[in-house]
Image (spheres, grey):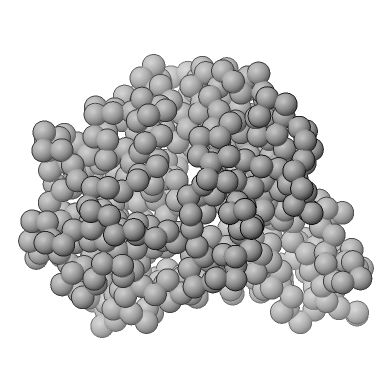
Amino acid sequence: MFEPDWAGRTAIIIEPSGDSITFGELEARSNRAAQFFRSAGLATGRTVAIAMENRIDLLVLAFGAQRAGLYYVVVNTHLTPAEAGYIIADSGAALVVSSAQCRSAVGEPAVPAYSVDPIDDPLWRALDLADYPAEPIADQAEGDFLLYSSGTTGRPKGIERALGGGAFGTYPDIPGKWLAGLLGFGVGDVYLCPAPLYHAAPLGWSMGALRHGGTVVVMEHFDAAAALELIERHRVTHSQWVPTMFVRMLKLDAAVRDRHDLRSHRVAVHAAAPCPVAVKHAMIDWWGPILFEFYSATEGVGATSIFSADWLTKPGSVGKPIMGTPHILDDDHQPLGPGEVGTVWFSGGSPFTYHGNPEKTAQAYDDAGRSTVGDMGWLDEDGYLFLADRRTNLIISGGVNIYPREIEDALILHPDVDDVAVVGAPDEEMGQRVVAHVAPRPGASPSAESLTEFARKTLAGFKIPRDYRFVDTLPRTPTGKLRKHLLV
């Protein structure tokens, strides 16, 4: 997987712990992980779940699963045990591997569970990869990650791509190709990952950077001042961010912002959430025209991108296609002209299915083979894509997708709630914040505190509404559909 002459080069650095690993060690340890998966009975095409904080073991296990031809699900460790358990069960994972820090997020797993740290729990088995051979398994094959998103039903859904049966070494590695082909990343370059590896882009781009011989510096937790210090200390050349991180760095004292030498920094990638135009202008003024924005979705239906120079002439745009071809269609599936807002469809994107959900998969495609995730936007006269909404109801807070239906389904169970609608409201730092519009039952007066306490029983903390607005009734159509645009 990794070139022999990279063996002595540093592959991964975790900050601030300072833990590091060379490419030679990563090769050996990922082989050991593949040997472990085979010894546990996982044949090509099976699924493994990984639940742990940003650490070397996560990437070792991901590469081990990749070379064993497995699907690997990296579980969001901020979910509740019930939410994480649903994903592990729905994915069909044959086993789960976690850490001392994150075992509680998994709860009591219903499949064999392993800990990479010492463990004294009868439900968990200790995993020491040193017990397994460092040689490649005999039947290496390309695996892939099985990513989980959420839909309008509120239940997380797995996004799956056929493994294809290709020989090991044939993985398409789209993020790596973009890094190398579009952004000039190669051996000796340094990629900074300031975000959790359980998200699609941080994991995919970190693995892509490693496949091209670059060093990956992974932050255990994002800190604005620390990120700048790491760019200087490690001579970071490439990085990836969400707009919330930009906001927090821009709010640092000028003395802190100007303290560090950032001249090594050639490309700052950003995605995952809409970036306010004023914020992006401020970042370009500070860092120079090194920002590269891409728009895509976990499903991989298509992608667009835009460099700073083009963006300055088309502020707010997410660029032109780099994968697939975008089409703007109205509700009757007719094409719309420049500047007209409709649903964004792509042809020629990466084929996918929703794991175990053929009905949902069928809804994502039309008769012409085009696919959509429901985002709204328009193309201008020059073919640049602009987004009107990152999905009709989707809330993106701090780069994290939050789906209102899941929150509504939780709050409607409160005994004092008659009706509820959840929307996103603009937030200067987070991009959006969760707001719940609540219609109490007649004679009831639920408080914001009681609703928050109730929601915490079933929802992860980042999904809890930050604001509650109490109303007599909610604007519904005769068919019961919420007219949420009246609440925003």
Residue 116 in which image quadrant? bottom left
Q: Residue at x 37, y 29 (%)?
A: 181
Q: Is residue 417 visible?
A: yes
Q: Number of marks in the image?
A: 0
Question: Which residue is outermost to the front?
Answer: 368
**Residue 275 x, y percent position in the rendering:** 62, 35
Q: Residue at x 23, y 53 (%)?
A: 167
In this image, 372 relative to 187: left or right? right
Residue 264 in which image quadrant? top left
In this image, 340 relative to 315: left or right? right
Q: Residue at x 59, y 74 (%)?
A: 457
**Residue 86 x, y percent position in the rendering:** 48, 74
Q: Residue at x 27, y 55 (%)?
A: 166
User: In this orientation, which residue lies closer to the viewer: 74 or 157?
Assistant: 157
In this image, 379 relative to 255: left or right? right
Q: Is residue 66 visible?
A: no
Residue 32 in which image quadrant? bottom left
In this image, 476 relative to 461: left or right? right
**Residue 316 x, y percent position in the rendering:** 67, 30
**Residue 224 x, y percent position in the rendering:** 48, 35
